[in-house]
Amino acid sequence: MTTKNDIEWKFSEGLTSYEEALETMENRVADIHAGNASELVWFVEHPPLYTAGTSAQEADLLAPKRFPVHYAGRGGQYTYHGPGQRVVYVMLDLNKRSRDVRKYIADLERWIIETLAEFNVHGEIREGRVGVWVEREGGREDKIAAIGVRVRKWVTFHGICINVEPDLSHYTGIVPCGISEHGVTSLVDLGLPVTMDDLDASLQKNWQKVFG
């Protein structure tokens, strides 16, 4: 059991609907701001769906009837969520940390990169391309993790997603994050038999290193 001064770690079994995720985040952010709840790091998987951020372009939704489309209110463009992808919703009170959204996003990137390194994956960031990328043979670069955040009254929500073993063909219904000249990959696509539990353990281990 946690107190309101601790971070709660929550792991949801099965597939969590996107509507439930949005409602839970909205309520928790309000409670954190009011001082009635602890910060929360929430691990979920979703059924197949597309989400549109505040910068989404209609032309980037290539197959609008393929999966449900949700307008998320987070920053960014279109992205995909589905089974085999770890989504982590991060609800932190930046009033108690640092009122610096750029630093917060950089910390999320570092958290992902430190975690991937434990599986011998060299994740990198690229100027003008949000998320974490890996270089493939021939110089090709594929995205392995996405970041989309929202901040209300200096309390964060939404967060990150890392591809463990999703159906990568599902990405063909969108232009992921508005970037058409690069692809997407996953830990299993890279030839690494990593499980969701393996990834979760590494994320927890590296949290303290980045967020203190």
Image: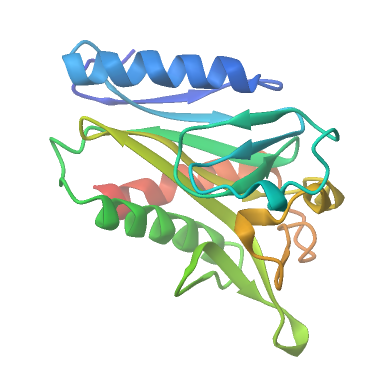
Residue 15 x %, y %: 70, 22
Q: Is residue 196 left or right of residue 171?
A: left
| Quarter in which the N terminus is drawn | top left
Residue 118 visible within the image = yes
Q: Which residue is at the far front? A: 58
Residue 179 x %, y %: 64, 65
How many numbered callouts? 0
Q: Is residue 85 left or right of residue 117?
A: right
Q: Residue 67 occupies which quadrant of the picture?
A: top right
Residue at coordinates 63% horizontally, 37% vertically from top-left?
Answer: 51
Residue 28 x %, y %: 35, 17
Q: Which residue is at the far bottom? A: 138
Q: Is residue 29 left or right of residue 109?
A: left
- Looking at the image, residue 59 lies above or below residue 82: below
Q: Is residue 19 left or right of residue 207?
A: right
Of the pair 88 and 130, the residue shown nearer to us: 130
Residue 54 x %, y %: 48, 42
Residue at coordinates 34% horizontally, 60% vertically from top-left?
Answer: 106
- Looking at the image, residue 170 lies above or below residue 139: above
Residue 45 visible within the image = no
Colour style of the rendered protein structure: rainbow
- Looking at the image, residue 137 lies above or below residue 18: below
Residue at coordinates 60% horizontally, 55% vertically from top-left?
Answer: 177
Residue at coordinates 39% horizontally, 52% vertically from top-left?
Answer: 108
